Each structure stands twice: as C-alpha cells, then as structure tokens.
Image: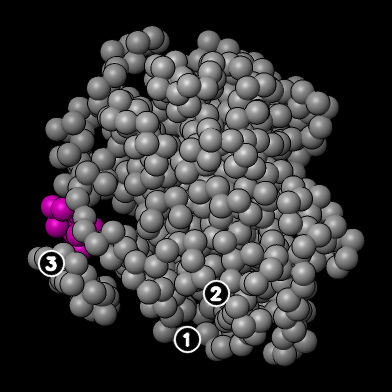
Amino acid sequence: MFGWGGHVLRIDLSKRKFVVQSLNSSLAQNYIGGRGFAIKTLWDELPPGADPLSPLNKLILAVGPLTALPIPNSGKLLVAAKSPLTGGYGDGNIGSWLAIHMRRAGLDMIIIEGKAEEPTYLYIENKGDEFRVDFNSAEDLWGLDSFTTEDRLKRIHGSDVGMVLIGPAGERLVRFATIVAQKGRSGGRPGIGAVMGSKNLKAVVMRGHGDVKVADPALRKMGVDAIVATKSKPNYPFWMRQGTTSTVEWAQEASVLPTYNYTEGQFDEYEKIGGFAVERSKVVTRSCPQCVMACGHVVKDTEGELAELDYENIAMLGSNLGIGDLTKVAYLNRIADMMGMDTISLGSTLGFAMEASEKGLLKDKIEWGDYKRAAEVAMDIALQRTELGRLLGKGVKAASMELGPEATEFAMHVKGLEISAYDCHAAPGMALAFSTSPIGAHHKDAWLISWEVQRGRFDYTREKVEKLVEMQNIRGGLFETIVTCRFPWVEVGLEIDWYFRLFKAATGMDMNMEVLSTINNRIYTLIRAFWIREYGHWDRAYDTPPAKWFKRPLSKGPLKGAKLDYDGYQKMLSWYYELRGWDERGIPRKDTLRHLGLDFVIPQLESRVNLN
C-alpha cells in the first residue's frame, strides 16, 4: 500500500508495554489519515461517556499520506483526544519534526492509552519494522517550562530527533493546555495537552529510520514544481515579509478585529501591533519542518526575550485585551508558549476576566490594557496557584457558569471552545463557520470571513452556506487528513489541483472534489455522532454563536450598530444541516449514515436520541 507507512504503534502507559499493528487498508481508503484516523479510533475504542482526563482516554498522534514528502509545507502532525475543555471531539494541527520521524519509521498513527504511575517521557526508535519504546522517568522534567524541557531532551537524545511535549499547564490539567514543539509551535486547542498531562506523559521523543514509499517516483519532481509554483505566486513576497500578521490591518479595516472581549471590531491602537509593526521589529522568521513560506515572525518582548507571533495571538493578546504594544503582546505570548497554553483561549479567557471584573462579577481587579496584571493571571492559570487561576483554567464556558447568568452573556465560545480572532457582529457566515466547526469555535476548518466581506457580509444566503461547506471540505477534509499545511493554498493561492495530483502520485488513488466531499462528509458526520454520543443528547443551540453578537451591537466604527440577526442565522443553520444530511436538530439522518458507510453508528445513537 503506497503512500501510507502501514503501521500503527499502540503504547500502554499503565502496563509499560507497546505493540506494532498493521494499518487497516479500508481505514486508509475511507478516512485517509490525520483527523479521519483519529475520529474513527476514538469512536471504536473509547468507552462512551469516558472522562477525558481518565486513563480511558486515548491520545492520538497521526500523520497523512502527504506528510513529510518533498512538497510544500508537509511537516505537520495531528494530535487528538476526547476534549477536557468541551467534552466532545478535540484535535489540533502542529508543525513538528516528530511527524517527519513517524513517516520515516513507517508509522501512520501512535495511540497512547492508560496512565503512567509517575512522570514519564517516551523515546521511540525503529530499525526496519522492529521498534524500541523506552519508558523514561520524567521526574526531573516535571514542572519545567516547554523551552527548557526541549533543550534538556535534545542534550540527552541529540538535536536530530522529533518531539512533542507539554509545559506546566498541561501537567496541572488546564483545560486549554496544548502540545508544544520547537519553542513556538503549539497544537491541540481543546486541551489535548491536559490529556497528555493526565497520563503523566511529559514528552514523546522519536528518531525514525527509513524512506517513505510512494506510488509514482515522479512525485519528487512534481513536489519541486509545486514549491516553485508556490514561490511564484504574486502575494508570496509580501507573505514572507509579514505572514498572517498583516491580517491585523485587514481585520481593522473590515471591522472584525476582536477588541475588548469581542465587544468591538476595531481597535484604536491597531497600527502598533499590526503587520507593519511586526515587520519593523522582526528579528528572525521560524517555520515548521519542510516549509517554504515561514509564518513564525519572531520579535523581542518587554524582557528582551524572543517570542514568535502570528495574527491569532496578536489579536487575542493585543486588541482583545486593549493592549497596543507589540512587545507586551509578545511577552504574554511567550508565557503561553513556555507554559504550554493555547494563545487564543488564553486571550479569550483573560478578556472574559477583564469584562467580568469591569462588571463587578470578579473580586479580583483586572483592567483593560494592564499587561502586567494579565501576565500575573496567565501564570496563575498555568500553575493553578490561586482561586482565580483555577477558575479561569477551566475555560470561559465553565468559568461563566460559575459566575452566573450575566457572565454567560459575554462568554465568547461555541461548545466550550473559545472563539478564534474574528469578531462576527457583521459576519453571519463566519459565525456559522465557528459554530459548525467540528471541534468548537475554530477558524481552521473554514476561513469564510474574507470571502464574506468581499461578497456581502450582511446577507443571510444559501450561497454562503454552500461556500462554507466547500471550504470545510477542503480545509478540514483535505488538509486535516493528508496532513499538510493549508497556507500555500489559502494564503498565496496554490491551486487545489496540485494536492489531488500529489495524492495520486503518493498513493496511486484518485482524488477530486467529488471524492473529497464524500470523505469529508463521512468524517464530519462521524465527529457529529461522537459529540451526540458523548453528550447523550443534542440541540441546535450547540451550533449557535454567543449571545453578545446578537444582543450588543458594535458601538463604533463604520459598522456602528451592526449585530447578528437571530432568525437569519437560524435559517442559514437549517440550510447547513440540509447540506450535511442532518435533521433540524443537527443530528445525522439514518439514510445519511448508511450512505456514508456509517451504519455502525446507528445503534449507539439510537440509544441516546431519536433518529429520523
């Protein structure tokens, strides 16, 4: 079977044992890799209703058939588990040399289960099809920040290994703790780092030996041609100067820049934290492995230390908190990276706390723009050392429920996952994208807002919904399963046909939009079934954005007075369900499940909800 390594490594931390299994060919054909492998494994193996922080949860590291190949931006890894933040399916995409080493070793997936008796890190190496897995003590690493941990592990195992690890936030089970790599790469927003911490697992280190076998030897030349095509795109030079940070200026102009906990869409000091400010301050640019369009723009923070920035963390730790100083934003971002916390969720949680403080719902004073107090609270969250830190470490949904009904009105999340950095008072399509993302409010599955701003932002049309599903098919269905970076396509315009041709060269299998749509619908529908199984019920309210966007209009800027229309949004949500083959509650229909080859889902769903 070309394109896949053909092996799954299963590690039991409780028993300190491992086994290498053959990859099921039907799994590869029907679910491709990455997210597809993750959700199918979780559905099949996780006991329904399992506590996400119990030994029963599975930590999954998965690659895809295009990962690590000599093509644009292929050094990506998918990490997944049942989310301790949302209670549903959770995953993240992270650049890491571990992905490269997994492919070299012929591994398509690593499944980690159980819980180590004491802090542990894994060292994995292969010799052909024979694998060695060492269960090493991490007692002297436990409590260390992610940067120091990486340095120590490289001193032990060499600088040529791949690794992922957690910081103190993951150890202390902060619900939005992430998995970290390369001192700035971070993935697993729904608390996948906390799952790793719950297993007493500090790091996974690997050295893989071997070559990735592909169906067509011409793939290497095709990959070079794709790289040349990427670098030849008109927007490529500007991208290399600013990367995603230029989105600050775009978002300001479009009135979608999250400001003061998503109360406004414009920030008076945006120029101090925007793409041109980053370009002037940049010290170096970092990237994931095998990347040709680096996005990690590194600046010096208030302490003169290096911090890696992109748009999401600038907006969430900058304008969303009322902070208009790039060095201060960089400082908060470095804290998040070192502690192993998601910057989006951290920024949203701090913004929520500032608004709660302003309204007198918190006894602790946290004022807008106070970066020193924000840094103190961020450390409290990571280390769980105060009552406030423990409250906010649960995420905005849980924190708002503890503070009372008034707080839930400005808790900016969907299904418990804090919203990525786009205000949607005047963007109903993007609000729908957030609300139907399979992991909660995240932008990676459909960055509809750029298209929407160009085509008509106040329209509640079926065309928008159709475009959303198309984007989800590509961003979530293609890039999260072949497991490569989407930036060549979405940021500089590399044609999607390149990926279909590369997939054919790697696997020998045909791929086109029709095939992709079927695979994506299968994966999205199985993920929706997982949510329903774990919740035990479902309601379309779970697919509805926060109350603030419906009730509190923008009070400044050219779109002053704008807010979402509830009836218009619900109409779009019904169209979305129709296009997915789900009923008016957002529950997959029986005929949809059968058509997608998901018949095995029906008995478990029928035990929880009525299926149409």
Visible residue check, residue 350: yes
- Indicate whether residue 115 is drawn in magenta: no
Q: Which residue is mark 2?
A: 113
Q: Is residue 14 left or right of residue 524?
A: right
Which SS class for mark 2?
A: strand
Up/down of 12 relative to 276, above or below: below
Q: Which residue is mark 3?
A: 611
- The mark nearer the N terminus, 2 or 3, is 2
Residue 600 locus on image (x, y percent): 26, 80
Q: Is residue 111 left or right of residue 419?
A: right
Q: Is residue 594 left or right of residue 414?
A: left
- Indicate whether residue 587 is drawn in magenta: yes
Residue at image position (60%, 30%) is 377
- The mark nearer the N terminus, 1 or 2, is 1
- Mark 1 vs mark 2, foreground winner is 2
Residue 62 locus on image (x, y percent): 56, 69
- Residue type at mark 2? Glu
For mark 1, does the 10 Å Cα neighbourhood hold few (<14), some (14 to 19), or many (20 or more) residues?
Answer: few
Mark 1 and mark 2: Cα distance apart in space: 20 Å
- The mark nearer the N terminus, 3 or 1, is 1
The part of the image, by quadrant, that contains residue 118 is bottom right
Please state the extent of the stretch shown in magenta in the rendering: 580-589
Visible residue check, residue 492: no
| Residue nearer the viewer, 389 or 458 | 389
Q: How is the image coloured?
A: one colour
- Residue type at mark 1? Asn
Residue at image position (64%, 85%) is 17
Residue 458 locus on image (x, y percent): 26, 26
Mark 2 and mark 3: Cα distance apart in space: 32 Å
Q: Which residue is mark 1?
A: 24
Which SS class for mark 1?
A: loop
